[in-house]
Image (cartoon, rainbow, N blue to C red):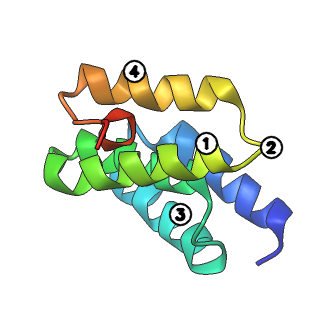
Amino acid sequence: MVPIVAAERLKLATSMGPRDPQFAISQANQVLAFDPNNGLAHAVLCYAQATLGQQSAAEPECNLALKLMRENPFALAQDTRDVTAFMRQHGLRNYTDMNP
């Protein structure tokens, strides 16, 4: 899968996610098979899992998304803020902001 195809899959997954979380999960997993360090794909997976009520699966995905986004100099700061806000709204713990 070329990066442009991955980006298009995530764009489609993001737009369809609220209506069809299973489709969003499928698209995100296809992107992750190509690029396991894609923070946005992990965020899409988190959103879809939370929509399905799968909080225990969504929480680590959101945390991984945040970690990868913060490590990526090309990631948008707004994406990180959106994931953090989503986690807060859905009662998901943010491990990335915890002090050891």
Percent from the top left, x then y, of residue 72?
71, 49
Q: Label 1's element?
A: helix
| Of pointers 1 and 3, the one earlier in the residue sequence | 3
Q: Residue at x 31, y 30 (%)?
A: 87
Q: Nearer the viewer, mark 3 or mark 2?
A: 2
| Of pointers 3 and 4, the one earlier in the residue sequence | 3
Q: Nearer the viewer, mark 2 or mark 1?
A: 1
CB atoms of marks 3 and 4 within 8 Å = no
Q: Residue at x 61, y 42 (%)?
A: 70
Q: Label 3's element?
A: helix
* Mark 4 residue type: Ala
The CA span between labels 4 and 2 is 20 Å
Q: Nearer the viewer, mark 4 or mark 1?
A: 1
The CA span between labels 2 and 1 is 9 Å
Q: Nearer the viewer, mark 3 or mark 4?
A: 4
| Of pointers 4 and 1, the one earlier in the residue sequence | 1
The CA span between labels 3 and 2 is 22 Å
Say whether residue 81 is visible. Answer: yes
Q: In this figure, which residue is indicated by the disc labeled 3?
A: 27
Q: In this figure, which residue is indicated by the disc labeled 2?
A: 74
Q: In this figure, which residue is indicated by the disc labeled 1?
A: 70
Q: Nearer the viewer, mark 1 or mark 3?
A: 1
Q: Residue at x 82, y 66 (%)?
A: 3
Percent from the top left, x then y, of residue 85?
40, 21
The answer to whether residue 91 is above or below residue 11 is above
Q: Label 4's element?
A: helix
* Quadrant occupied by the N terminus: bottom right
CB atoms of marks 2 and 1 within 8 Å = no
